[in-house]
Image: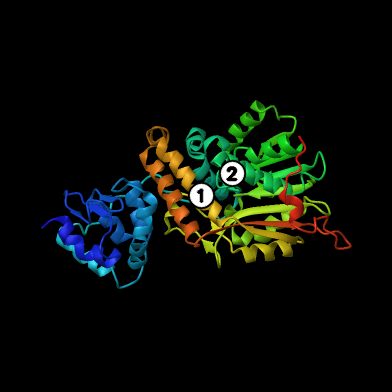
């Protein structure tokens, strides 16, 4: 009996009648020839991995190893497979059927070792050493690879599509512009800005070039640090922008007028929220402002070791409920002045990144290898679906340091920062 025939009852239990085509390692298949994409199950090891890790980690390992692959629109395939993930993790529902099918196919043995791209964190969680290792795992995979994914903007955070006609680079500039205005960089010349987790320097360069700000950008990624300095020098902004290889916990003894933290907060961890906001608050004078831009999750979510993202993408990361972020900022002495959701914008951003990766797939594989390229494709496509269905959020939270009389120095309404007043 073919693999498809043996697995038909299990597949039906997991996702119902298949509306996509599923092709197995023996050449047999389920589903229509003209379905909504094709899922290739190329090896019995895929079934072994799923049985031994019946959560997102097992299928994720199989995809990274090339034992499962997606043909057609990967976003649609992920959507169609969402019920399977829920059923596999529901105790007593699909797992016995999976073992029964595996026994008939004689593939009950243990799976191969996990792909080597899997992170293995050691040491105290959110210590400087462990955080540096986590950041290196994610960001130090080659600047040229990130140039493929991110495009000319070289910005690895949610863009802001202020107009539906914007391309990705324009939307990233729109995001940076909105943050500069929220931070008041258009109100006075020569303000001093700290950009925490500066990536490849795009926000720092935008603020210096368009608003005359003096900027210090910090990162703990060696490769980001090197390329950001090169980009600053090439743009002729070395007199305005300093890029440091520095942990935020080592900041002190300096004063900044404003602080931006864009896409870095996910690495901080709940147990360090108070420390994080207290360190940044101590760097600001009265009326100083902080803009915290971060992925959020209702109720909060610690990305665990049994998750695909925790093992392959962002080890030790945590998504904090935006309400908890507001409370932590207030506890540190900030007055929270504005909260904005950009959830749908991140879905659009991720779709653009996936399109970039797929358009230069062969070059990406040449640079980082097939398994790592598949990590990024699956992670970004899955995240896009998460932002579209509301499972993930993205919030910008703006806080100001009040003076002794309670004044914040903030505009009375958002209207005053909607239209840019750039200082060339």
Residue 220 at least partly seen: no
Mark 1–mark 2 distance (CA, rounded to whole Å): 10 Å
Task: Please name the residue shown 71% across and 34% down the image.
Answer: 209
- 109 vs 27, nearest the viewer: 27
Residue 359 picture location, percent across and down: 41, 37
Q: Are marks 1 and 2 in contact (CB under 8 Å)?
A: yes
Q: Which residue is mark 1?
A: 348
> Which label is found at residue 49?
none
SS under mark 1: helix
Residue extending farthest bottom: 92
Question: Local crowd at mark 1 within 10 Å, few (<14), some, or many (≥20)?
Answer: some
Residue 163 picture location, percent across and down: 59, 47
Q: Quadrant of the N terminus?
A: bottom left
Q: Which residue is mark 2?
A: 171
Task: Please name the residue shown 40% across and 42% down the image.
Answer: 372
Q: How is the image coloured?
A: rainbow
Q: Is residue 73 above or below residue 109?
A: above
SS under mark 2: helix
- 185 vs 372, nearest the viewer: 185
Task: Please name the residue shown 35% across and 51% down the image.
Answer: 61
Residue 221 picture location, percent across and down: 58, 40
């Amino acid at each position: 009996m073919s693999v498809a025939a043996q697995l038909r009852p299990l597949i039906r239990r997991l996702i119902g009648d298949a509306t996509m085509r599923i092709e197995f390692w023996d050449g047999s298949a389920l589903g229509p020839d003209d379905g909504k994409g094709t899922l290739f199950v190329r090896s019995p090891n895929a079934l072994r991995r799923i049985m031994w890790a019946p959560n997102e980690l097992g299928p994720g390992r199989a995809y990274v190893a090339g034992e499962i692959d997606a043909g057609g629109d990967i976003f649609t395939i992920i959507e169609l497979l969402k019920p399977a993930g829920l059923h596999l993790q529901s105790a007593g529902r699909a797992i016995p059927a999976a073992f029964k099918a595996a026994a008939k196919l004689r593939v009950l043995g243990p799976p191969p070792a996990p792909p080597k791209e899997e992170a293995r964190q050691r040491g105290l969680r959110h210590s400087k050493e462990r955080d540096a290792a986590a950041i290196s795992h994610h960001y130090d995979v080659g600047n040229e690879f990130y140039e493929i994914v991110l495009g000319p903007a070289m910005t690895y955070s949610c863009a802001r599509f202020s107009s539906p006609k914007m391309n990705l680079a324009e939307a990233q500039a729109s995001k940076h512009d909105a943050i500069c205005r929220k931070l008041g960089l258009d109100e006075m010349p020569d303000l001093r800005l700290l950009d925490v987790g500066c990536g490849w320097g795009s926000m720092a360069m935008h603020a210096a070039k368009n608003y005359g700000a003096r900027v210090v950008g910090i990162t703990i990624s060696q490769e980001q640090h090197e390329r950001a300095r090169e980009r600053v020098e090439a743009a002729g902004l070395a007199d305005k922008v300093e890029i440091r290889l520095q942990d935020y916990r080592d900041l002190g003894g300096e004063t900044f007028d404003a602080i931006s933290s864009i896409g870095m907060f996910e690495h901080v961890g709940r147990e360090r929220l108070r420390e994080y906001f207290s360190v940044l608050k101590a760097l600001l004078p009265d009326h100083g402002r902080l803009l915290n831009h971060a992925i959020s999750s209702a109720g909060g979510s610690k990305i665990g070791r049994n998750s695909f993202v925790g093992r392959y993408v962002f080890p030790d990361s945590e998504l904090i409920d935006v309400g908890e972020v507001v409370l932590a900022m207030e506890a540190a002495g900030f007055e929270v002045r504005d909260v904005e959701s950009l959830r749908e914008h991140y879905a659009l951003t991720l779709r653009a990144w996936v399109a970039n990766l797929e358009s230069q797939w062969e070059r990406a594989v040449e640079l980082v290898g097939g398994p790592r390229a598949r990590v990024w494709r699956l992670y970004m496509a899955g995240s896009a679906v998460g932002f579209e269905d509301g499972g993930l959020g993205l919030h910008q939270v703006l806080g100001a340091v009040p003076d002794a009389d309670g004044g914040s120095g903030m505009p009375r309404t958002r209207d005053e920062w909607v239209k840019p007043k750039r200082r060339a």
